[in-house]
Image (cartoon, helix red, strand yellow):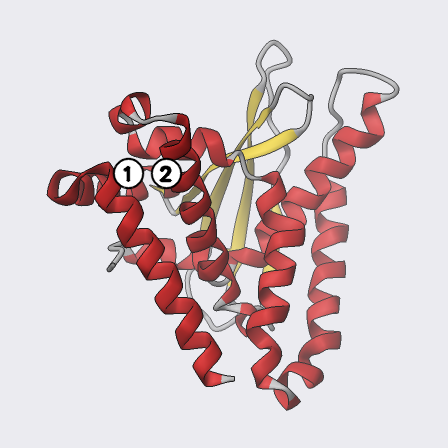
Amino acid sequence: MKIVIKNRLGYVGRGLFLTMTALWISLVGVQSANSAESKEVSNPTQLMRDLTDQVMQSLVDKEEFLQENPEEVNDVARYLVNKFVIPHLDMILMSRWIVGKSWKKATPEKRRQFTDQFTEMLIGTYASALLEFRGKSVAFKPFHRDPKRKDGVVKADFYSGDGAPTVPVWFRVRLDKSEQWKVFDIIVDGVSLVKNYRSSFSAEIRKVGFDGLIARLTKHNLDKKNSSSSKN
């Protein structure tokens, strides 16, 4: 299955993985620290900066090992994605928004199958770019949130370090039922991750139906896994 995504979203799959990792760790950490004291959520900007530096350093520390053991890159990357990223994405909300009416019509089992395969695809997307984060930097802006609302926006600028233009990134976040921050959309240079996948998947659904989309996603993920295994 070929997933067509606008070029600007390449930043999401590559250079911004590190940004998202630091963001999600910090959001969860801030919420956990505050939950015992107050429902109010502190400004996470400084913590984001600190954690970004820590994650970048961890990648530098692993660089020699990964260069000497390239067959381990995919496994290490998938581990990092599963540990730091996926738990802090609202995959149910993202899945529901992306497939729209098909979600309402689908059985709980079909919804689970789609969410599982979409999650697997995202893991593969981020994991494929582990070694591209060297020399990157991120500047976070103040965290904006209306205290009367359960959602907010974290803004950041991504610098590639190669003279390319700065890329603005917005992370749309919300408090879930357990009062934990979850990311439900990422807007890169004005392009929404959710809207792009919705456009791509809607075209697939029109062609092969919701069941067909799930089947194609499943095959896509299996092909990626087999391709990765054959290279090791």
- Residue 102 bears which disc, if any? none
- Give whichever of 53, 215 is nearer the camera: 215
Q: Residue at x 50, y 56 (%)?
A: 123
Please, what secondary structure does the residue beneath circle 1 have? helix
Q: According to the image, label 1 marks what residue?
A: 198
The residue positioned farthest toward the top in the image shown: 148
Q: Position of residue 70 (x, y in %)?
A: 58, 84
* Front one among 165 and 16: 16
For residue 202, what is the image quadrant? top left
Residue at the location (64% across, 34% down)? 142
Q: Measure the C-alpha gap from mark 1 to mark 2.
A: 6 Å
Residue 7 left/right relative to 120: left
Crowdedness of circle 1 by 10 Å Cα count: few (<14), some, many (20+)?
some
Asked if marks 1 and 2 touch (Cβ < 8 Å), the reply is yes
Residue to which mark 2 is pinned:
194
Q: Position of residue 170 (x, y in %)?
A: 49, 39
Quarter of the image with the N terminus in it: bottom left
What residue is drawn where x is 38% and y is 29%? 96
Residue 203 location (% of width, % of height): 16, 43
Residue nearer the viewer, 165 or 57: 57
Quadrant of res 94: top left
Q: Quadrant of residue 219?
A: bottom left
Eyeballing the image, is 3 above or below 77?
A: above
Q: Amino acid at mark 2?
A: Val
* Residue found at the far bottom of this picture: 68
Q: Is residue 205 left or right of residue 120?
A: left
Looking at the picture, how far across and down is residue 113, in whole percent?
40, 41
Q: How many circles with numbers are drawn on the protein?
A: 2
Residue kind at label 1, given as amino acid type: Arg
